[in-house]
Image (cartoon, grey):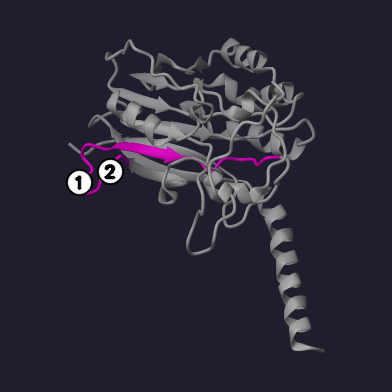
């Protein structure tokens, strides 16, 4: 056989193998366990279940059952950073998936896919610039999603503030509506009566992270990036679909500087970016970036 033909056949075989694995990896859900020293010395730890980017459709029973099973972790707080939907009929599916988690204290913000149905996009455009909203997008039933979550007692933090008693501590929250759609507007009046402020946003654009950190948030939670979704083993994410640097595409970091527990990080907030659970139905693949939720335990700082 011609060497070039052999090479082409080998490349085709490798490509097929990567594609096959990427479809499997997109259903290989994992729960990450992380901790951050963000509380006052002597405070009781707070266990946060951070979930993001479910991108649910009515047919995804396997994903729905996995999300429902997360209630076994019995978190002190659930933080949902948006993009729960990926289909015009997905609101009942999303509320069913989240139902067992609604018995715990929770807060949420929306992402662009909670407002508009996904459309096919050329995947290569992600390498050039953040995605943009198409003309005449199909609106989703965002109001019903919001009503279902707030009816269960979760706080709607879309350009809003709130407070909860968690583990005997008063925790205040500041949230932003989706920055990817330009809907973010920091609420003016601040509540300074709590010992911990948590910032919540869907897309971690640098302007929103700066605003939340300046507002006094010592912990910021976000999603949107999918962790890069298709990553290079040993290197990491190629894109974040926003202006956040790829080194912080997922995981626990500091903002704007080093982590607060690292040298020079005393002025930083803790930033956790979730790689998320789902994908667009038009690109249902992941490479070197398993779908995830995170159990983030906030620990007391050392005296």
Mark 1 and mark 2 in contact (Cβ < 8 Å)? yes
Task: Find the residue positioned furthest to the left.
Answer: 303
Residue underneath mark 1: 264
Task: Find the residue positioned furthest to the front.
Answer: 135
- Distance of mark 2 from mark 1, alpha carbons? 7 Å
Is residue 8 at least partly visible in the picture?
A: yes
Q: Nearer the viewer, residue 189 or 37?
A: 189
Q: Quadrant of the C terminus?
A: top left
Relative height, residue 100 to residue 143 (above, below): below
Q: Which residues are magenta?
A: 255-280
Q: Quadrant of the N terminus?
A: bottom right
Is residue 45 at least partly visible in the picture?
A: no
Residue underneath mark 2: 257
Question: Where is residue 203 shown, x and y percent of the image?
Answer: 49, 33
Side of 195 relative to 4 (left or right): left
Queried whether the magenta region covers residue 256, the answer comes back as yes
Residue 298's quadrant in the figure?
A: top left
Question: Where is residue 199 shown, x and y percent of the image?
Answer: 39, 26
Query: What is the secondary structure assignment of the residue under circle 1?
Result: loop
Relative height, residue 185 to residue 271 (above, below): above
Question: Where is residue 41 shown, x and y percent of the image?
Answer: 22, 32
Queried whether the magenta region covers residue 275, the answer comes back as yes
- Tell me the residue at 30%/23% (across/down): 215
- Tell me the residue at 20%/46% (across/down): 264
């Amino acid at each position: 056989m011609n060497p070039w033909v052999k090479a082409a056949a080998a490349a085709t075989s490798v490509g097929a193998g990567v594609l096959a694995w990427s479809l499997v990896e997109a259903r290989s859900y994992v729960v990450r366990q992380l901790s951050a020293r963000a509380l006052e010395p002597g405070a009781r730890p707070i266990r946060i279940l951070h979930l993001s980017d479910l991108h649910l459709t009515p047919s995804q029973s396997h994903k729905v059952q996995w999300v429902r099973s997360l209630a076994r972790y019995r978190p002190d707080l659930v933080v949902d950073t948006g993009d729960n939907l990926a289909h015009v009929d997905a609101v009942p599916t999303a509320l069913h998936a989240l139902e067992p988690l609604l018995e715990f204290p929770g807060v949420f913000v929306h992402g662009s896919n909670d407002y508009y149905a996904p459309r096919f996009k050329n995947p290569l455009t992600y390498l050039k610039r953040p995605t943009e909203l198409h003309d005449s997008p199909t609106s989703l039933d965002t109001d019903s999603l919001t009503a279902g979550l707030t009816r269960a007692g979760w706080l709607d933090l879309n350009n809003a503030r709130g407070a909860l008693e968690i583990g005997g501590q008063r925790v205040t929250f500041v949230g932003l509506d989706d920055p990817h759609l330009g809907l973010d507007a920091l609420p003016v009046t601040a509540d300074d009566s709590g010992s911990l402020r948590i910032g919540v946003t869907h897309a971690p654009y640098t302007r929103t992270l700066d605003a939340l950190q300046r507002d006094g948030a010592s912990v910021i939670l976000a999603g949107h990036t999918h962790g890069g979704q298709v990553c290079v083993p040993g290197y990491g994410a190629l894109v974040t679909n926003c202006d956040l640097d790829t080194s912080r595409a997922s995981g626990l970091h500091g903002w704007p500087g080093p982590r607060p527990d690292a040298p020079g990080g005393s002025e930083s907030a803790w930033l956790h970016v979730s790689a998320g659970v789902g994908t667009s139905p038009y690109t249902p693949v992941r490479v070197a970036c398993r779908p995830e939720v995170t159990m983030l335990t906030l620990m007391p700082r050392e005296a």
